[in-house]
Amino acid sequence: MKYLFKFILILASFAFLVIFTRDGIMPKVYDFVSSDAMLVDSDDLGDQQAIVDDSDLTRSAHSHCNTLILEKYGSDYTLSMPQTALNIWDIGAHDYVVNGEANIAMDNGASITKKYVCRIRFGEGNATDIDNWSLYDISGLDDIEETLSSNEEG
């Protein structure tokens, strides 16, 4: 009887904790997470439209994306990039999304143009120093080999 009472007491305590957490604590946690307290506090607010004015940060973001693309793919392919990006978005907190083109030369002399998207973040310091930038991702150039082989066949 003594063990049964302890077992029931443990089960009741566990049920109380589950219900209290689910109905008492978690609604407060959800309210806090959805509030403005979880937003990044930054002096750089970002923009939903592509940037049309050319600033040091946008030029540097495009330039550093091109440099990082050349580092990643330049040993396998002959790449050249235009001096200006197709579009650049400032998405806030000094994060930039760069949409550009890369011209890829093939061995037979033909070339193809592939569009890419690069997400990059400026830390602090000199914008022209690549060490002050962090690359999140490059997409659009992963299928270069398939594109080159389909162009050679066709």
Image (cartoon, rainbow, N blue to C red):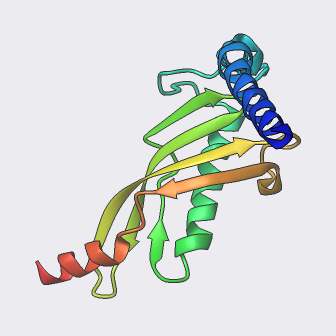
Residue 39 seen anywhere in this rendered image of the structure: no
The relative height of residue 65 versus residue 90 in the rendered view (above or below) is: below
Residue 71 placement (x, y as % from top left):
62, 71
Image position of 92 (left or right of 82): right
Q: Which of the two residues, 150 or 64, is positioned nearer the viewer here? A: 150
Residue 151 placement (x, y as % from top left):
19, 76
Residue drawn at (30%, 72%), measured in percent from left and top? 111
Residue drawn at (89%, 41%), measured in percent from left and top? 125
Instruction: Single out the residue that lies furthest toward the front.
Output: 1
The relative height of residue 100 versus residue 6 in the rendered view (above or below) is: below
The relative height of residue 69 versus residue 84 in the rendered view (above or below) is: below
Residue drawn at (82%, 49%), measured in percent from left and top? 132
Quarter holding the N terminus is: top right
Q: How many labels does the image show?
A: 0
Residue 19 appears in which quarter of the rendering?
top right
Residue 6 placement (x, y as % from top left):
83, 37
Q: Which of the two residues, 146 or 129, is positioned nearer the viewer here? A: 146
Residue 75 seen anywhere in this rendered image of the structure: yes
Residue drawn at (70%, 36%), measured in percent from left and top? 57
Image position of 89 (left or right of 151): right
Quarter holding the C terminus is: bottom left
Image position of 106 (left or right of 98): left
Residue 91 placement (x, y as % from top left):
60, 29
Instruction: Single out the residue that lies furthest toward the right.
Output: 125
Q: Which of the two residues, 30 or 88, is positioned nearer the viewer here? A: 30
Residue 43 appears in which quarter of the rendering?
top right
Residue 59 appears in which quarter of the rendering?
top right
